[in-house]
Image: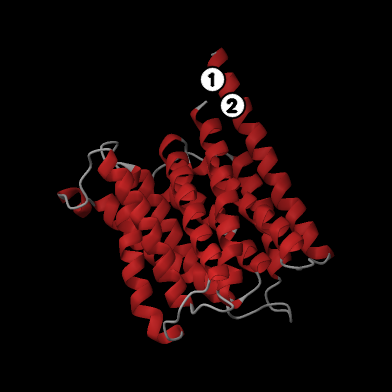
Amino acid sequence: MANTRAILLMTAAMACFATSDAFINIASKTVPTGQLFTVTCALSFAAFLVVMLKNGDRLFTRMVFNKAVVIRTAGEVFGSLGYVMALTLIPLTTASAVLQVQPLVMTLAAAFFLGEKVGPRRWTAVAIGFCGVVLIIRPGTAAFDPNIVWALFGIIGLTARDLGTRMLPKTISTPFVSAWALLFLTFLGVAITPLTGAWQPIDAGNAIWVVGISIFVVFAYIFVNGALRVGEVSAIAPFRYTRMVFALMIAMLFLGERPDALTMLGIALIVGSGIYAFLRERQIARAAVRS
């Protein structure tokens, strides 16, 4: 039942990420992207550092040079940069929808680099979800926004991050790898600040969004790392689609975004494929127990 637990953890992580995405979308309208990136990553880093110290872990050890840690950290840096830039340039619904291409990329990566076996039914579920994403993005039409390239850049990085996470030795803790990734992301935020606008005071209203981003990112990191370390990547990958569902709900209720009929059809395909993959996984687990 490890995959079932991983699926639940991944869904919780996606809910947290969708909430932080909405906060980023709101705060970025008045706070420069680089500054927002720097402050939220620094706060999240501090939270994980406190957890490490409480657990008796050290930040500066030779484990930081572990191949899996290096891959994961590099992927996190490039992936987060691409996705955050997308969130500040395109609507929340669109950015979240583009990110849903990642399960397909992740399944391919797991099959080619980790040697995981992916059955035809899982491939079918992921492919149907991908078709739903295409309906939402609609490349080649007037609805297509070239700033979506930032999100595609993010997908490549985040896929590398997830592969690195899957390769991590059991002796390396989640707070350790998360803290190092966030430390580098903080430095990246400082580096891009001059390109995105001068540093400015953050008023009380934006401070709420900034703190909220950090809190939800911390919980999302914990959940997603837990999911990737206990379950098969190819089994839990389709449940990244739920991030868009949560984002859509938030966008409609709080940001005034109104998806059209094709977008709703795409979402239905994504949700349907995710539910099918979940039911199929439980069927496999029950069969394994009986045998």
Q: CA distance from mark 1 to mark 2?
A: 6 Å
Q: Which three-letter amino acid code belongs to the residue tagged 1?
A: Ala
Q: Which mark is residue 263?
A: none
Residue 39 in the image: state x and y as whole percent.
Answer: 41, 68
Q: Residue at x 52, y 25 (%)?
A: 1
- What secondary structure is marked by label 1? helix
* Residue ranking furthest to the right: 261
Viewed as shown, does residue 207 lie left or right of 133? Answer: left
Q: Which residue is mark 1?
A: 288
In the image, what residue occupies the spot 74% across and 82% down? Answer: 142
Position in image of residue 35 (x %, y %): 43, 75
Q: Nearer the viewer, residue 174 or 290?
A: 174
Q: Secondary structure at mark 2?
A: helix
- Position of residue 118 measured from the top left corner of the image (x, y, whole percent): 52, 41
Q: Nearer the viewer, residue 234 or 205?
A: 205
Front in this rendered view, residue 39 or 277: 39
Residue at the spot 49% in from the left edge and 49% down from the top edge? 220
Name the amino acid, label 2: Ile
Please tell me how crowded label 2 is: few (under 14), some (14-19), or many (20+) other residues with Cα within 10 Å: few
Dot 1 and dot 2 residues touching (CB under 8 Å): yes
Q: Is residue 209 left or right of residue 63?
A: right
User: What residue sits 39% from the left and 51% below the top?
Assistant: 163
The quarter holding residue 26 reads bottom right
Name of the residue lying farthest toward the top: 290
Tell me the crowding category of disc 1: few under 14, some 14 to 19, or many 20 or more residues within 10 angstroms, Cα based. Answer: few
Tell me the residue that label 2 is attached to. 284
